[in-house]
Amino acid sequence: MKGIGVSPGISIGKAYVLRQRKEVASGVVLTDESAVLQEIGRYGEAVKLSVKEVQELFEKVVKEERDILEVQLELLQDPQLETDVRTRISSDKMTARDAVLMVIGLAVQVFEQMEDEYLKARAADVRDAGNRIVRNLSDGTGRNLSGSAGSLISNSGEGLIIIAEDLSPSETIGMDRSKVVGFATQSGGKTSHVAIVARLRGLPAVVGCGGELDGIVDGDRVVLDGNQGLVLVNPDASIVDEYRKKREIFIQEVRRLETLKDQPAVTTDGVKIELLANIATAEDMEQALAFGAEGVGLFRTELLFMERDSFPTEDEQVEYYKTILLQAGNRIVTIRTLDIGGDKPLPYLELPEEDNPFLGYRAIRICLDRKDIFLTQLKAILRASVFGKCRIMLPMISGVREVQQARAILEEAKEELFRSGIAFDTSIKMGIMIEVPSAAVIADLLAKEVDFFSIGTNDLCQYVLAADRMNKQIKDLYDPYHPAVLRLIRFVIEQGHLQGIPVGMCGELAGDPQATSLLLGMGLTEFSMNAPAIPTIKDILIQSSEAAARKNFQL
């Protein structure tokens, strides 16, 4: 069966099926005030116990996994979560368990409806925190590897491959490394914390397999191919032998790629290529450095705004950006200004109902309309700029006027800080994402207004082809290799170079090995991607000639 390979490698083992207990609200209505107070108290105790459980995991995991657990701690102790749960208990007379299920369910829905893959994956973190509280409000039992798992290993001598509808980040972190050799799930995505943990531990993993996994039972022999996203159940002995050989070849290849970490990405004819990472958190920055990233081509700032009940203050934003810049050292960090609206609502920002929010009031359009929000963020970025090397990137630009308006507000932010005697990088660069077709078509005009371009192929492709990339019914229409998309990419790169500004790419195409030579032939010299893709792309580049790629490029 086919899924999405989110952690490379090949595992052969026995299936261990984790059945997910479906949590259903009881519907009990509290009848008096004493019961309300009792439930509020029970909720508080459940949160304390949940926090204690997560903290106990800290001593058993590596730093990057601690960063993921920190996210759960923040969610467990989120004041907005507590307020919402208490309100449901006191006003709606719900039990604490029912209140948590409702509040968490609504929050999960918000994230799951987002188109941005990274933010959509955060639904698992919210669900994980909620489920932990619910378990501690119930009987405290959860899914774990025990009993039959131990007997499966002793009887077969092979490790376990976990089969589940889904796995939570904390479940993945809590896996016994001596028993588990991989996992496959029905749901999930590439940027989930579950996928990150799997990659950190070197566990092959395949997600998004759908209902076909239902047919697997405990003890089935499973071959898991995280490279191709394949799950083979009870294959013939010859196929198992074939995959054992593939596993040895893969292990040798991983060791070879690890030696490239500190090697610059220079083509055989001497052209230097910048390999950057797309990040959203400090844990992402750690991972980026571990894979050899030379900087950050896309730092998403939305999470700081989304996981709270009010806008972050200027000082809070400064600390957030400062943390990343200090981690990056002298490497460039490209900070994208707030990209909300469409699939990324803010609960405390009332946005109008729209027939087509993805083409509506969002991103730079909100920022230019709500100057107070934009000015605060720009001042925070400027203040943080003294702690590292950063540049500002504007999303969803469709024309020259928007850039000029944003530039004017940036100058106003500089002037305010200058009058207050606050230090900042006076020569900070400002660029734009090219993700709207109109921006690509007038790239020659926009290149005169900005310091750099970064091509966002995900949105550019779906807007050019009028094909929602998340709609399975038209998934075949979403094609980043469509000539119309490639011609626009080539034009943007050409016009940027004619005006002497760097042109990068931060969409998924930048991390696709099949596109590397094509993009090199177009003249792209800055690739930004999810960190685990960096070694493979670097390996292709250092074995390539830019001159040959240009010669072979035809469109």
Image (cartoon, grey):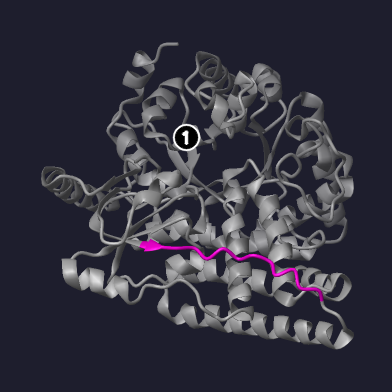
Q: Quadrant of residue 555?
A: top left
Compared with 335, 176 (above or below) is: below
Q: Residues within 10 Å of mark 1 (few under 14, many from 20)?
A: many
Can you see residue 207? yes
Q: Position of residue 489 (x, y in %)?
A: 54, 22
As for residue 23 lying within the magenta part, the answer is yes
Please state, as top left, top right, bottom left or bottom right, where the N terminus lies in the image.
Answer: top left
Residue 286 is left or right of residue 123, and the answer is left
Q: Residue furthest top?
A: 555
Q: Residue at x 45, y 46 (%)?
A: 211
The magenta stretch spans residue 265: no
Q: Quadrant of residue 24?
A: bottom right
Residue drawn where x is 50% and y is 14% of the image: 483
Q: Nearest the camera: 193 or 255? A: 193
Judging depth in this view, the residue of 19 and 385 nearest the camera is: 19
Label 1 element class: helix
Q: In the image shown, does 402 or 364 lie closer to the viewer?
A: 364
Give coordinates of residue 187: x percent, y percent.
49, 49
The x and y percentages for residue 50 are 59, 79
Q: Residue 182: x, y in percent? A: 32, 58
Answer left or right for 157 relative to 505.
left
Q: Magenta part of the protein: which range?
A: 17-29
Query: Considering only vertical position in the picture, is 442 above or below 276?
Result: above
The prevailing secondary structure element of the residues shown in magenta is loop
Inspect this view and state whether residue 329 appears. no
In the figure, residue 534 lies in which quadrant?
Answer: top left
Residue drawn at x 40%, y 51% as measured from the top left: 214
- Asked whether, in this view, residue 13 is left or right of residue 115, the answer is left
In the image, residue 496 above or below residue 231: above
In this view, 339 is above or below 397: below
- Residue behind mark 1: 510
The three-letter amino acid code for the residue at tag 1 is: Ala
